[in-house]
Amino acid sequence: METIAITLPDGAKREVPKGTTPAQIAQQISSSLAKSALVARVDGGLVDLSRPLLDNAKLEILTAKDPDALFVFRHSAAHLLAAAVLELFPDVKLGIGPPIDTGFFYEFLRNEPFSADDLGRIEKKMHELAAQDIPNERKLIPKPEALELYKKWDQGFKCELVEEKATEPMVSFYTTGKFIDFCLGPHIPSTGRIQAFKLMNVAGAYWKGMETNPQMQRIYGACFFTEQELKDYLHRLEEAKRRDHRVLGPQLGLFTIEEEAGPGLIFWHPKGGLVRKIMEDWSREEHLRRGYNLVFTPHVMRLDLWNTSGHTNFYRENMFGPMEVEKAEYQLKPMNCPGHILIYKSRLRSYRELPLRLAELGTVYRYERSGVLHGLLRVRGFTQDDAHIFCTRDQLEKEIEGCVDFALAVLRTFGFEQYIIELSARDPAHPEHYAGTVEEWEHAEGALKNALGRMNIPYKYMPGEAVFYGPKIDFKLLDAIGRPWQLSTVQFDFNLPQRFGLEYVGEDGARHQPVMVHRALWGAVERFFGVLIEHYAGAFPAWLAPVQVSILPVSGKFEAYARGVADKLRNAGFRVHLDDRNEKLQAKIRDAQLEKIPYMLVVGGKEEEAGSVSVRHRAKGDQGARPLAEFVTALLEEVENRVAQ
């Protein structure tokens, strides 16, 4: 009998008969592993547990502990969905059904829209099929036969996929009971393990994402290994709904989007404008403290400038159309960098002036398609906290360290304690895809690595994820419910200094080209503000809150004392609201809670007589009576320290 050598993750080797399956090897190792096994990794690639092993190989049996197994698990759940839909609605036309981050979806063409009742029936049918523990079996069918089958079943989209993607004579299919799908796999052995899932919603999607193609109905489902994981996920969704900035923003008087003006354009209302001012004041002061120069550049500039920068070539589809002024074409700026470059180029620079750090809260305009616009998080007009640093190669690592330190200071200041850092590098196999020489890339990537290393900051290395003009560091903060948000970025640029012919006079009297660092910390004021709203569920910490204190007189006879309290607080620099409405105290407290004001000060006869206030915190409730001066001192300390709660 011919045998092959199988190497396990611990280095152990097994001689097994040729044709042995990963499932059989799992059983040999332990019965518990065999029961929990979902898929196998053979020489780095994923295969079914039932796939015969024909050559010497490295083998790993994957269980629920491996992220790749979850990907396969959710793919199998998508097939289970399609099988259920076909049983209930046999006339539907099938599209595609991939796994996604939290579950799966499958696309269908159907004359009638799927209703909420339909989703309930489909989910019930999925549970019935799962309970039957139906095997997922791989079959190889000759391509002509596969096409004939799909034509017979009137599945035109599947015919199209087979024609386009089946490059081998034999086409890979998977069956789940009566359901058969063109699919490369792999899949988990059977439907029995798929228990923790829920169909979430139906959305429209054009076939292959092209507007000229038919519109499909895409059924989305959430799927996890355990019911507890599913329950936790659904809870996070409810929490995210409660924190939705698109709802809280208008409710709290922070911002609106006015369709009369156009989608993706933000109107900052007085309270939102006040929070923005606080944010921007902090940012400008911190930039000045860290040696940046504040600049302002025009919102519109000649189109020729964007030709030089290269934006009209590689970014045209995200730019608004040019406008003609005095027979010359002008362009709304999608980026701030060319404006900063022109300031640098306005005269010949000396090495003594470097590093030159130019910072701007610069408003830019980008043509985002209506389908991707999303509240404050994806807009067409927004303000970046943009900076560009022009420096020598010797200064680069120190400047990177400064940018990283600044980014971390932003996260700490605004109350974000958890974050992930990624270093995006070039793909060494394809140097032709990137500007600059191999030596320049090695120098730039080394500078980023060295800076993070000296600061003892762990990061994830992401080869192939760099932009074409240089490597970068990305910061992804995690909000109060664990969602990641991509905001801060530090990017190295080989491209623009070359395109614009930037120079400085070195210590040797010769002219040299500076290096350039792009740096944004919030990313955009709008996006960061949206994240702040959701992180705090609209209940901003006292230092950021548009109204920090609400004064609540028990009745009209105590208004004079209440006004005196309000005046003292305003004189101390606080943002105060006096609620002198002819309403009961409980109604005033309720309304202040709904407005998410951090502190409520109740004043009546006892407080007036003692020169005190009864303090109520929006989250901690009644804090008891305190002398007004003591409350002022405590709140001043909280605001000055920017306490994030």
Image (cartoon, grey):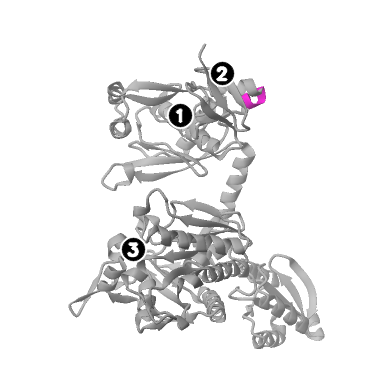
Q: Residue furthest left?
A: 327
The answer to which of 9 and 339 lies nearer the viewer is 9
Q: Earlier in the sequence, mark 2 or mark 1?
A: 2
Determine whether, in the image, residue 483 is placed left or right of residue 180: right
On screen, 464 above or below 284? Answer: above
Question: Which quadrant of the figure contains the C terminus?
Answer: bottom right
Residue that label 2 marks = 16
Which residue is disc 1 drawn over?
84
Other-residue count near label 3 (Cα within 10 Å), few / some / many at <14 / 14–19 / ≥20: some
Q: Nearer the viewer, mark 2 or mark 3?
A: 2
The magenta stretch spans which residues? 31-35
User: What residue sits right under mark 3 in the picture?
Assistant: 367
Q: Closer to the N terminus: mark 2 or mark 3?
A: 2
Horizontal and vertical percent for residue 538? 58, 65
| One can see residue 180 in this view | no
Judged from the image, the secondary structure of the residue bearing numbered disc 1 is helix
Q: CA distance from mark 2 to mark 3?
A: 60 Å
Judged left or right of residue 345, residue 190 is: right
The secondary element bearing badge 3 is classed as: loop
Q: Residue at x 71, y 69 (%)?
A: 617
As rendered, which of 225 and 123 lies closer to the eye?
A: 225
* Residue 274 appears in the picture as rendered: yes
Pick the residue in front: 319 or 612: 319
Q: Are marks 3 and 1 in contact (CB under 8 Å)?
A: no
Decide whether the magenta segment is chiefly helix, strand or loop.
helix
